[in-house]
């Protein structure tokens, strides 16, 4: 799989920050550009312009796009990026449910960002945000050769992935636990490099691979 940069618009142009967020949210929603254009009452060529060029669409257009994608206006504009999730209020009648393993795997998807939790004598309890790619049932992660993950390798760790819907007060979380493995086989490392969806968000100097095959997978979802 060829890695796709999150800083490039689908058509290859640099795009604006808003355009890249629209393209990303559209892809996450499983919509084609034509389908989104139809939903918001716009011409597909205009939507392409918004996604791929340095466009500055007005608030009315962005609101229609946000509603069609199921995201907030703040998410498209990036004004929510400086704040933690949970700025909204709880729903009036939330329902908390357990998710089965199959649903947990579906929610994790093929790639994303999660939080790795572990404890070592040198560091104590640590939680690190890391982007991942799922390869043959394993969560694959990258770090530096002598970083915290190297210290945690061989021990039991937890990896959490979640999603929050601010507008509805809903969301879900999945927790995978198992043994973190340090990939030392060069051929295996090259295979993971080819399969990676993206480079490491924290910097491309992180070239050492680690894998986690979930031994236990649990999840919960809040419905409203």
Image (cartoon, rainbow, N blue to C red):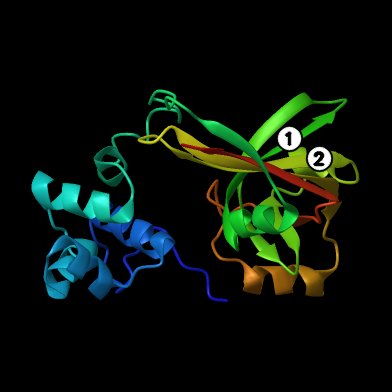
Task: Tell me if mark 1 has few (under 14), some (14-19) or many (20+) residues whose alpha carbon lies within 10 angstroms of its own.
Answer: some
Which residue is painted at 82% across and 29% down in the image? 119
**Residue at position x 37%, y 30% from top?**
82
Farthest residue toward the right? Answer: 154
Q: Position of residue 83 (x, y in %)?
A: 40, 27
Q: With respect to residue 33, does 171 lie above or below?
A: above
Please determine whether, in this image, residue 45 is positioned above or below residue 17: below
Q: Secondary structure at mark 1?
A: strand
Residue occupied by mark 2:
157
* 197 displayed left or right of 93: right
Q: Identify the residue under disc 1.
A: 117
Q: Is residue 219 visible?
A: yes
User: Marks 1 and 2, how far apart in space?
Assistant: 6 Å
Q: In the rendering, at what x and y percent does residue 47 appear?
A: 18, 66
- Return the disc, 1 or 2, that comes first in the chain's sequence: 1
Instruction: Establish if 82 lies above or below 181.
Output: above
Q: In which quadrant of the rendered view does residue 168 lie?
A: top left
Q: Indicate the position of residue 144 as horizontal and vertical percent values.
A: 70, 48
Percent across and percent down for residue 18 are 24, 51
Q: In this image, 74 relative to 117: left or right?
A: left
Q: Is residue 207 shown to the viewer in this render?
A: no
Numbered tag placed on residue 180 in the rendering: none
Give the structural element (helix, strand or loop) at label 2.
strand
């Amino acid at each position: 799989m060829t890695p796709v940069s999150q800083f490039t618009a689908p058509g290859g142009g640099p795009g604006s920050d808003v355009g890249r967020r629209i393209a990303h949210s559209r892809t996450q929603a499983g919509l084609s550009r034509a389908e989104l254009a139809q939903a918001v009452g716009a011409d597909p060529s205009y939507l392409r312009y918004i996604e791929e060029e340095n466009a500055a669409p007005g608030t009315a257009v962005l609101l229609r796009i946000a509603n069609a994608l199921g995201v907030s206006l703040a998410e498209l504009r990036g004004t929510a990026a400086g704040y933690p999730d949970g700025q909204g209020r709880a729903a009036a009648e939330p329902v908390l449910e357990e998710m089965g393993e199959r649903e947990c795997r579906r929610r994790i998807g093929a790639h994303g960002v999660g939080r790795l939790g572990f404890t070592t004598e040198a560091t104590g309890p640590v939680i690190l945000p890391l982007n991942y790619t799922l390869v043959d049932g394993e969560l694959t992660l990258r770090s530096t050769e002598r970083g915290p993950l190297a210290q945690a390798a061989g021990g039991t760790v937890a990896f959490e992935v979640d999603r929050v819907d601010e507008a509805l007060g809903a969301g879900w979380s999945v927790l995978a636990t198992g043994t973190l493995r340090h990939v030392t086989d060069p051929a295996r490392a090259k295979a993971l490099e080819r399969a990676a969806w993206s480079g490491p968000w924290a910097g491309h100097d992180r070239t050492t691979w680690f894998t986690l095959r979930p031994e236990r997978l649990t999840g919960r979802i809040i419905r409203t």
